[in-house]
Image (cartoon, coloured by chain):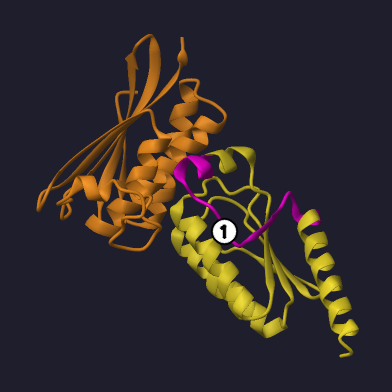
Chain colours: A yellow, B orange
Amino acid sequence: MDVPILKQGDYLIASILGALTDTALTRLQENLVRSVRKYRSKGVVIDVTVLDVMDSFAARTLRAITIMTRLLGARVVIVGIQPEIAFSMVQLGLNLEGALTALDLEDGLAMLKTADTKEQDRLRRHGR
Amino acid sequence: MDAEMIIIDSDAGVMCARQKGRELAMAIGISGSDLTLIATAISEIARNIVQYAGQGEIEFRFVEGRGKRGLLIIARDHGPGIANIGQAMQDGFSTSKGMGLGLSGAKRLMDDFEIVSEVGKGTTISMVKWGRSS
């Protein structure tokens, strides 16, 4: 099952709809990076609310997505990590170093907007 | 249930095994974050089977001990085996993709964990998650 990617203005929203195989996760990585380029997106929200397991492969893929997307000039926010998933990640010794996280989709989008506003202010102050 | 078995030969099998593990653990009253820990541990060892051995199987059994019921998960493959188990159990050690947390991570997520491996013959991992006292 592929993860649908929704375009909303400057942002992309990828909502994971259920358990994912490694293949589906890898495809999400490819599709997201390609979509960021195609739509010149400024940010991506990945909603993992219903993801059943965050194991080492899933964490590694999300980190890779974060890094690749950053290389294209966009930010990634991972939202919806459930308490029990956070617990298992800590037990397993996983982290999403460098990735932004937020409680849910709404907070994630707000985080991207705030970051973009700050960025625009900064550019304006520097007279561009 | 005597035993249930899932063939692991693709990443669809990995997903199937972790869902089965969650379901069976629930059946003996394991709940909450323990279900996620079990599913995650299964995901790690099942992925190891696909990556290193190509195929294998995961067997589930209910066990009893110390006044508790538990879920025993046995992962078996006839792959290349592990030459240095001590090294393979170290955090960060990986000869393939992943973060090198597969075996050591699975051990931390479960209550009991045992690994037997012979080079050229394969690997068997047995791990248990115990429920609360009945």
Q: Is residue B36 above or below residue A93?
A: above
Look at the image and tell me whether residue B17 can be seen: no
Q: Give the residue at x 48% y 32%.
A: B23
Q: x and y percent of residue A56 in the render?
A: 45, 53
Badge 1 element = loop
Indicate the chain on which mark 1 is placed: A
- Whether A41 is among the magenta residues is no
Q: Give the residue at x 76% y 71%.
A: A11
**Position of residue B107 in the picture relative to residue B52 (left or right):** right
Q: x and y percent of residue A27 in the render?
A: 51, 69
Based on the displayed image, in which of its 4 quarters is residue A120 positioned?
A: bottom right
Q: Is residue B28 above or below residue B34?
A: above
- Whether A101 is among the magenta residues is yes
| Magenta-colored span | A88-106
- Seen from the viewer's position, the closer of residues A103 and B69 is A103
Look at the image and tell me whether residue A38 can be seen: yes
- Seen from the viewer's position, the closer of residues B123 and A117 is A117
**Position of residue B127 in the picture relative to residue A53 (left or right):** left
**Position of residue A91 in the picture relative to residue A70 (left or right):** left
Q: Is residue A56 above or below residue A63?
A: above
**Position of residue A61 in the picture relative to residue A74 (left or right):** left
Amino acid identity at mark 1: Glu
Q: x and y percent of residue A3 in the render?
A: 60, 63
